[in-house]
């Protein structure tokens, strides 16, 4: 497939605005230079309210430029995990430069809070910023800087291990996404062979990944204790600035999903089993079309994917289509799967030029269309919030970021004729709605598992695998027959990069999916208004508390049974599940 970004060239992209504090051509890959720049800001005298606001804006400029420098290295590393020079550059940044500025960042935060007491600023404008910096000062411990660096390096190791996994199948060496295509083939023996080949190849990395996670767990628990927290759960909630809900709220979500969502998952599974004429569903029976139709093939080359998705965005809103076209024209998309490329997909905002970049592994399946729609929603968030002057306000809380992305997947359903005829469009829409319901259960699985992990940090690898199976079955895994495959089932969580790299970052998908379902229902009444409200909410970035962002987009911020029930019922009705 075409479309490859071998090297992201920031210099070829226009600046959002001229720098006023950071020198042009500044070397953010020199620890000494970066430390000196941060110290200059830290030590600058501030005598008036105007000078204070100027100091804040200079800090925003500096942090955005530094963030972008790291993003460029991360993007290059994930695009080419087998390039040692690129990997070494990213490692140096994580090992030497990021840890060097962390103590000075804390000192700058402390200076901000002192100056905030001296000078009057717009209370509403700085409310969220004040809250975040006060929290960060309370949480910061100098001794955690090297520990956080070590965790980041272990995360890179996870990427390297995962990116290197290829599968020998049908006489070819294939990437994981390329083998996954066979799971959509009608030939059940072929699906089973592909599933087993992948599972067995992943299982070869079992001990390596389990040991890697043990090291991560130990470091994270130590970080939490150093910060005066009872465990890493408490620490990470504060670290993520989760001011508007608690671990107990998450556990209420788990209960609501078990009571409301899991029974619908059972109905979805029962209908699939009946349509396929099977007495039991095996893991390789979940992605194929249940009526034995050939797998959906929406495109063969990446340019077709780009063109079709751009047309969909244009139909939803012409401005969105224009923004996506701008990305394609600026080489801000790397979409094709290839050897040496990290797995998965993401959108990363280049913070100084205020432009989004999208990474994914397209192989020509329906899920590729959904992934690009999803990451496109994140990109629109970056465009919408670009006008926020404060750097931290250009990124919303993750719970709302995922509303941006998941809503695009649902809003696109009416326009999938860009890729499919009528029957295939209906197939894709139904499959997606089933995935939405099952995602709510999967979020509960991953989140519940992580709560147990960090509330019981002294557990063994064997206890962790047993707990995974218990939690997996609680939220719907029991509807599949894993007989004889229990060893593979026990390490399914190894595939979930969030558990390794961004712990506790998963409940956001559940909260956001409920927001996206609300936008979907709003669009059925008045699409133009629903999209306008959506874009208005995105434009606020992170400048307001989470409940206010939801409200601005016309949504309720609630993930209890009261909200989950009606939304799941609407999706269930759409699917024709009584």
Image (tube, rainbow, N blue to C red):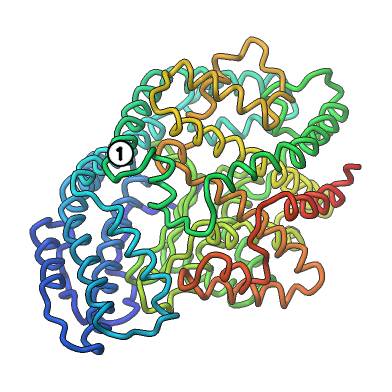
Snapshot quadrant of residue 101 = bottom left
77 and 128: which one is in front?
128
**Vertical placement of 376 versus 279: above or below?**
below
Would residue 308 be visible to someone looking at this image?
no
Q: Residue at x 49, y 35 (%)?
A: 450
Residue ID for mark 1: 225
**Vertical placement of 142 versus 123: above or below?**
above
Describe residue 247's horizontal placement relative to residue 289 as left or right.
left
Residue 18 lies, in percent from the top left, at 26, 82
Residue 153 lies, in percent from the top left, at 27, 39
Residue 561 lies, in percent from the top left, at 73, 49
Describe residue 553's horizontal placement relative to residue 383 as left or right.
right
* Residue at the top extreme of this rendering: 484
**Vertical placement of 14 versus 259: above or below?**
below
302 and 75: which one is in front?
75
Snapshot quadrant of residue 289 = top right
Mark 1 lies on a secondary structure that is helix
**Vertical placement of 146 versus 98: above or below?**
above
Q: Residue at x 58, y 20 (%)?
A: 489
* Residue at the right extreme of this rendering: 578
Quarter occupied by the C terminus: top right
Would residue 448 be visible to someone looking at this image?
yes
Q: Residue at x 59, y 77 (%)?
A: 536
Classify 10 Å Cα crowding around label 1: few (below 14), some (14-19), many (20 and above).
some
Residue 206 lies, in percent from the top left, at 43, 20
Describe residue 465's horizontal placement relative to residue 11 as left or right.
right
């Amino acid at each position: 497939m075409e479309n490859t970004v071998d090297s992201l060239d920031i210099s070829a992209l226009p600046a959002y605005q001229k720098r006023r504090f950071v020198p042009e051509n500044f070397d953010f890959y020199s620890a000494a230079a970066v430390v000196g720049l941060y110290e200059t800001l830290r030590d600058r005298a501030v005598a008036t309210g105007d000078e204070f606001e100027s100091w804040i804006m200079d800090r925003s400029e500096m942090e955005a430029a530094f963030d972008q420098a790291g993003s460029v290295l991360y993007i290059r590393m994930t695009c080419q995990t087998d390039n040692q020079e690129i990997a070494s550059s990213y490692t140096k940044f994580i090992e030497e430069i990021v840890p060097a500025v962390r103590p000075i960042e804390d000192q700058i935060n402390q200076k901000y809070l002192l100056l905030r007491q001296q000078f009057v600023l717009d209370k509403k404008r700085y409310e969220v910023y004040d809250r975040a910096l006060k929290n960060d000062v309370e949480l910061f411990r100098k001794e955690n800087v090297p520990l956080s660096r070590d965790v980041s390096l272990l995360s890179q190791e996870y990427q390297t291990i995962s990116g290197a996994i290829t599968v020998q199948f049908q006489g070819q060496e294939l990437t994981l996404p390329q083998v996954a295509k066979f799971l959509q083939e009608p030939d059940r023996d072929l699906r089973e062979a592909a599933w087993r080949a992948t599972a067995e190849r992943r299982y070869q990395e079992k001990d390596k990944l389990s040991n890697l996670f043990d090291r991560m767990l130990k470091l994270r628990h130590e970080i939490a204790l150093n910060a005066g927290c009872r465990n890493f759960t408490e620490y990470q909630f504060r670290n993520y600035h989760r001011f508007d809900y608690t671990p107990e709220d998450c556990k209420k979500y788990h209960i609501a999903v078990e009571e409301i969502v899991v029974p619908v998952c059972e109905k979805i599974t029962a209908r699939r089993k009946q349509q396929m004429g099977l007495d039991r569903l095996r893991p390789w029976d979940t992605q194929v079309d249940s009526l034995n139709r050939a797998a959906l093939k929406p495109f063969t080359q990446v340019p077709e994917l780009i063109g079709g998705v751009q047309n969909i965005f244009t139909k939803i809103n012409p401005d969105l289509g224009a923004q996506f076209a701008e990305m394609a024209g600026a080489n801000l998309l790397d979409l094709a799967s290839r050897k040496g490329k990290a797995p998965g997909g993401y959108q990363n905002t280049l913070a100084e030029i205020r432009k989004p970049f999208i990474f994914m592994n397209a192989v020509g399946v329906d899920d590729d269309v959904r992934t690009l729609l999803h990451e496109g929603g994140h990109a629109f968030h970056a465009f919408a919030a670009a006008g926020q002057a404060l750097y931290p306000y250009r990124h919303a809380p993750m719970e709302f970021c995922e509303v941006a992305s998941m809503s695009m997947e649902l809003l696109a359903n009416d326009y999938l004729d860009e890729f499919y005829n009528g029957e295939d469009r209906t197939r894709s829409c139904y499959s997606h709605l089933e995935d939405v319901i099952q995602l709510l259960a999967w979020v509960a699985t991953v989140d519940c598992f992580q709560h147990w992990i960090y509330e019981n940090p002294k557990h063994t690898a064997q206890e962790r695998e047993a707990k995974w199976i218990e939690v997996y079955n609680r939220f719907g895994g029991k509807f599949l027959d894993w007989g004889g495959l229990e060893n593979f089932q026990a390490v399914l969580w190894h595939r979930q990069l969030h558990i390794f790299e961004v712990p506790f970052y998963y409940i956001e998908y559940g909260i956001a999916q409920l927001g996206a379902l609300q936008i979907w229902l709003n669009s059925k009444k008045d699409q133009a208004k629903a999209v306008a409200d959506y874009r208005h909410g995105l434009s606020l970035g992170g400048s307001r508390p989470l409940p206010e962002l939801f409200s601005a987009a016309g949504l309720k911020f609630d993930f209890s049974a009261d909200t989950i029930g009606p939304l799941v019922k609407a999706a269930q009705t759409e699917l024709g599940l009584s």
